[in-house]
Amino acid sequence: MGVKLYKVECRGMVHEIVDMAHGIAYVIAENPEEAYRKVRNHLDAKNLGFASDREMKTIELLAEDDEYPLCGIRLYR
């Protein structure tokens, strides 16, 4: 199987107060754990929000780089 596109939503920072909702991200990764880890590492490195804001609320598989994706939507990269 190829990589997948996930939508990761954190518990906080989901409203565009200034110009970006840091708590919502689209991530290309091989699995959901890697997708969240990428988002969390970035938020931690930038020290954005509180630690509780950085916790994952939801993660959704949007598309897969596979000939016959199980989620029904093909990701082209």
Image (cartoon, rainbow, N blue to C red):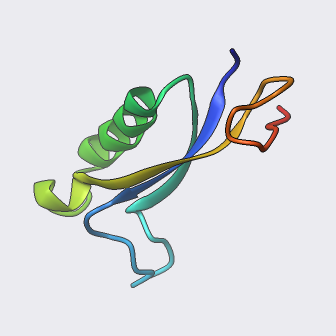
Residue 8: x and y in percent read: 45, 51
Residue at image location 40% in from the left, 80% down from the top: 15
Residue at image location 44% in from the left, 33% down from the top: 32
Q: Residue furthest bottom?
A: 17
From the viewer's perspective, is residue 68 above or below residue 11? above
Q: Indicate the quadrant containing the C terminus: top left, top right, bottom left or bottom right.
A: top right
For the image, the number of numbered tags is 0
Residue 1: x and y in percent read: 69, 15
For residue 45, side relative to residue 71 (left or right): left
Q: Would you identify the image quadrant in which residue 41 lies?
A: top left
Q: Residue furthest top?
A: 1
Residue at image location 36% in from the left, 42% down from the top: 42
Residue at image location 82% in from the left, 27% down from the top: 68
From the viewer's perspective, is residue 29 above or below residue 10? above
Residues 5 and 22: in front is 5
Q: Would you identify the image quadrant in which residue 74 lies?
A: top right
Residue 66: x and y in percent read: 79, 24
Residue 29: x and y in percent read: 56, 29
From the viewer's perspective, is residue 56 above or below residue 21? above
For residue 11, side relative to residue 64 (left or right): left
From the viewer's perspective, is residue 2 above or below residue 72? above
Q: Would you identify the image quadrant in which residue 13 lies?
A: bottom left
